[in-house]
Image (spheres, rainbow, N blue to C red):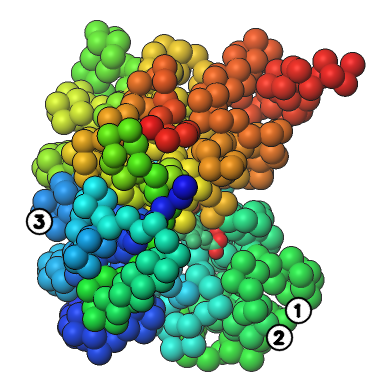
């Protein structure tokens, strides 16, 4: 079952943010509110658009997520993973310590993102 | 080097103040993102995948140590300690905060730099040959003309809202070191039989989803008529260029759809009407600009420096760097030094703030306080004494910038790709890093010789893949990163657009595929042939069957 979380860039610093359970925006996808029904998604998108009107974020949209076996939220698409976790080329810029996010540097097993890790 | 006059200074400072007001209005909600977007783009500010990105112009690629130090300061204060050199003599910062950008721009203005016309649908930063003023094969210093074009194009009232971006490059050599033929307008400075200076004008070149080599619209536009001719081209484009579809809005599509003869006729008609207007460039104005680019005070030296020759003999690593990165200078006893930004540690084109400071110091000591940026995401010290090359090489090595790989397989042009860019299908930098690792052996790189590998993360072609001897284009195949290979392109004087060789390869397989192509080249090359020469001689078929043997079996 595909669930969603809502993401955007914060207006003042441009950084990637996710809408949390309390409706506030934070940098970590782990704290994002997971939306399980279309109804919830609609309500929350309306809230996100209001946040855009209020100069808090820019360009909010929903992304598909799944949960890994530890119950952590993970974006489904690799684009959204790079957005959530930071550039894969630079350890210092990675937002979270996500195992495998930088493993392409290992020439032998460069592909970490095909399928949900 | 060009210095701001009162007008330039006031203009740039006013622009900073204006943008400061716009940012305040954006933060307060007076401006929506929709209203603000074109304003920030006019000031070089994008919103990317992870953050804002600011693109700063380095007009015709020439800048000073003081400017480089300021860029280092900006990297430390407003970014995360890095800068990224692009393919059009710009530098990008990947992490500035919107609220800081006005201060950042004010600091740039202190050293006569700005981000104006680095984005948006206007005439972009005019680029030039990075060896200008240093190389013997040029007719004139292309920067003089790039500056004249810049002054004309900056805030040109008619051309601030074009259908699409518009890029101009200038060269004065038969060698093309600025991908001139792939610009909206490419200018080659020429002399006619009477010894007068003029321009061979190419129009309608470009990369992106419809790559085109430019076509010559005029073989010789006299120097004094350059601006009226450019104005005529821009007018025809502005009047007739398509605005219904942004992918068809570049002048290359107009030239293609109109036909060259008709385009020429329209341009000439427009030109005739404005040739004798205020757009004539008076001789004294040319001389005034020329004075800014006067050669530095070269010493009178012998053509050969004994000490330099001895060092090459004694130190093979130094000799290798010289043979890879150092080019002949027009002035006896001097040399042009290429500084590769394709090192082991950083993404292609990236440089740390510490390296920027080190290079600024070295430029002051060794190269008359002057640095150049190239379209291949490298830097150049244009005027180094041969007798000081060894010292310079040692010091470059200490800051990690003595990689001798200019023009080699690891000297790739690589776009930021999905690690930074919101438009990307795939990442580019990790593929480049894996190829660099595979070909880390310098002996092997030198054996392969000139090999231009270029990577773009989507069809916008920022990584110039169409003009790579080997080009890689990232495509999304059902949610996975794949790479399509093109072969046979060139962005140099032997300009060509590469052809797609076959189905794309997965990220896991792409480096092996590149290695197969290169191995085949090594097996079948004739003496002295580059990869591109071999490809042109034998055609695509052998490369195709090497990459897709199973297809052949199936067909047999
Ligand atoms: C990450 C931010 C970037 C974004 C969003 C971006 C976006 C684009 C887009 C949309 C185009 C298409 C132009 C067209 O066909 O009309 C383009 C073209 C181009 N970009 Fe970028 N770009 C980025 C970074 C870069 C970098 C880092 C470089 C240099 C390494 C670069 C060099 C170019 C060049 C040379 C073209 C011209 C291709 C042509 O002639 O059509 N870009 N870019
Ligand atoms: S080629 Fe595509 S992916 Fe690469 S920087 Fe340009 S727009 Fe982004």
Task: State the residue at coordinates (26%, 55%).
Answer: A32
Q: Nearer the viewer, mark 1 or mark 3?
A: 3
Up/down of B210 relative to A47, above or below: above
The answer to which image quadrant residue B111 occupies is: bottom left
The answer to which image quadrant residue B20 occupies is: bottom left
Residue B413 in the image: state x and y as whole percent.
45, 40
Quadrant (top left, top right, bottom left, bottom right) of the N terminus of chain B? bottom left
Identify the secondary structure beneath mark 3: helix
Mark 2 nearby-residue class (10 Å; few <14, some 14–19, many ≥20): few
Q: Which residue is mark 1?
A: B265
Task: State the residue at coordinates (26%, 23%).
Answer: B305
Left or right: B26 as drawn, with respect to B528: left
Numbered tag placed on residue B269 in the rendering: 2
The chain containing the residue under callout 1 comes to: B
Question: Does the image show residue B526?
Answer: no
Residue B400 in the image: state x and y as whole percent.
20, 28
Q: Which residue is mark 3?
A: B77
Identify the secondary structure beneath mark 2: helix
The foreground one among B250 and B142 is B250
The answer to which image quadrant residue B150 occupies is: bottom left
Q: Nearer the viewer, mark 3 or mark 2?
A: 3
């Amino acid at each position: 079952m595909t669930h969603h979380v809502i993401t955007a860039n914060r207006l003042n610093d441009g950084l990637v943010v996710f809408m949390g359970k309390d409706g506030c925006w934070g940098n970590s996808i782990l704290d994002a509110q997971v939306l399980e029904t279309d109804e919830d998604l609609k309500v929350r998108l309306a809230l996100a658009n209001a946040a855009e009107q209020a100069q808090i974020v820019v360009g909010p949209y929903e992304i598909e997520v799944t949960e890994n076996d530890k119950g952590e939220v993970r974006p489904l698409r690799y684009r959204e993973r790079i957005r959530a976790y930071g550039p894969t080329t630079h350890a210092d810029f990675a937002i979270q310590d996500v195992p495998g996010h930088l493993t392409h540097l290992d020439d032998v097993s460069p592909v970490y993102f095909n399928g949900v890790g | 080097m060009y210095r701001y006059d009162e007008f330039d200074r006031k203009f740039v400072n006013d622009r900073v103040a204006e943008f400061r007001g716009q940012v305040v209005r954006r933060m307060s909600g007076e401006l929506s993102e929709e209203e603000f977007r074109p304003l920030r783009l006019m000031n070089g500010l994008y919103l990317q995948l992870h953050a804002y990105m600011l693109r700063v112009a380095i007009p015709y690629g020439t800048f000073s140590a003081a400017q480089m130090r300021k860029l280092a300061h900006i990297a430390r204060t407003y970014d995360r300690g890095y800068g990224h050199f692009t393919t059009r003599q710009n530098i990008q910062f990947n992490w500035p905060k919107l609220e800081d950008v006005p201060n950042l721009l004010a600091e740039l203005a202190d050293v006569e730099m700005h981000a104006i016309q680095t984005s948006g649908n206007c005439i972009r930063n005019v680029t030039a040959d990075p060896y200008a003023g240093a190389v013997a094969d040029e007719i004139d210093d292309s920067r003089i003309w790039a500056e004249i074009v810049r002054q004309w194009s900056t805030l040109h009232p008619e051309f601030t809202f074009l259908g699409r971006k518009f890029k101009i490059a200038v060269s004065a050599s038969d060698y093309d070191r600025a991908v001139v033929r792939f610009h909206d307008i490419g200018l080659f400075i020429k002399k006619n039989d009477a010894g007068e200076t003029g321009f061979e004008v190419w129009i309608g070149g470009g990369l992106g989803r419809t790559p085109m080599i430019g076509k010559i619209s005029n073989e010789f536009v006299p120097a004094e008529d350059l601006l009226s001719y450019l104005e005529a081209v821009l007018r025809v484009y502005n009047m007739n260029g398509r605005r219904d579809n942004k992918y068809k809005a570049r002048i290359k599509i107009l030239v293609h759809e109109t036909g060259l003869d008709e385009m020429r006729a329209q341009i000439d008609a427009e030109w005739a009407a404005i040739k004798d207007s205020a757009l004539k460039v008076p001789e004294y104005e040319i001389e005034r600009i020329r004075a800014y680019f006067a050669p530095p005070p070269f010493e009178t030296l012998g053509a050969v420096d004994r000490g330099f020759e001895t060092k090459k003999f004694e130190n093979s690593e130094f000799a290798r760097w010289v043979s890879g990165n150092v080019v002949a200078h027009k002035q006896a006893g001097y040399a042009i030094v290429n500084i590769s930004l394709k090192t082991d540690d950083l993404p292609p084109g990236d440089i740390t703030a510490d390296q920027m400071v080190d290079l600024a110091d070295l430029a002051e000591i060794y190269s008359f306080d002057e640095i150049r940026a190239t379209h291949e995401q490298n830097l150049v010290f244009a005027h180094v004494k041969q007798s000081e090359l060894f010292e310079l090489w040692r010091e470059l090595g200490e800051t990690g910038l003595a990689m001798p790989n200019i023009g080699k397989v690891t000297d790739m042009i690589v776009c930021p790709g999905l690690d930074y860019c919101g438009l990307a299908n795939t990442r580019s930098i990790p593929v480049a890093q894996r190829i660099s690792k595979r070909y880390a052996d310098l002996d092997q790189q030198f054996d392969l010789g000139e090999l231009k590998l270029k990577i773009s993360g989507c069809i916008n072609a920022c990584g110039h893949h169409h003009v790579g001897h080997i080009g890689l284009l990232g495509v999304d195949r059902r949610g996975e990163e794949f790479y399509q290979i093109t072969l046979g392109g060139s962005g140099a004087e032997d300009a060509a657009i590469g052809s797609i060789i076959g189905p794309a390869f997965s990220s896991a397989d792409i480096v092996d595929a590149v290695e197969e192509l290169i191995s085949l080249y090594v097996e079948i090359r004739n003496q002295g042939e580059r990869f591109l020469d071999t490809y042109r001689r034998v055609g695509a078929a052998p490369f195709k069957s090497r990459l897709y043997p199973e297809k052949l079996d199936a067909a047999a």
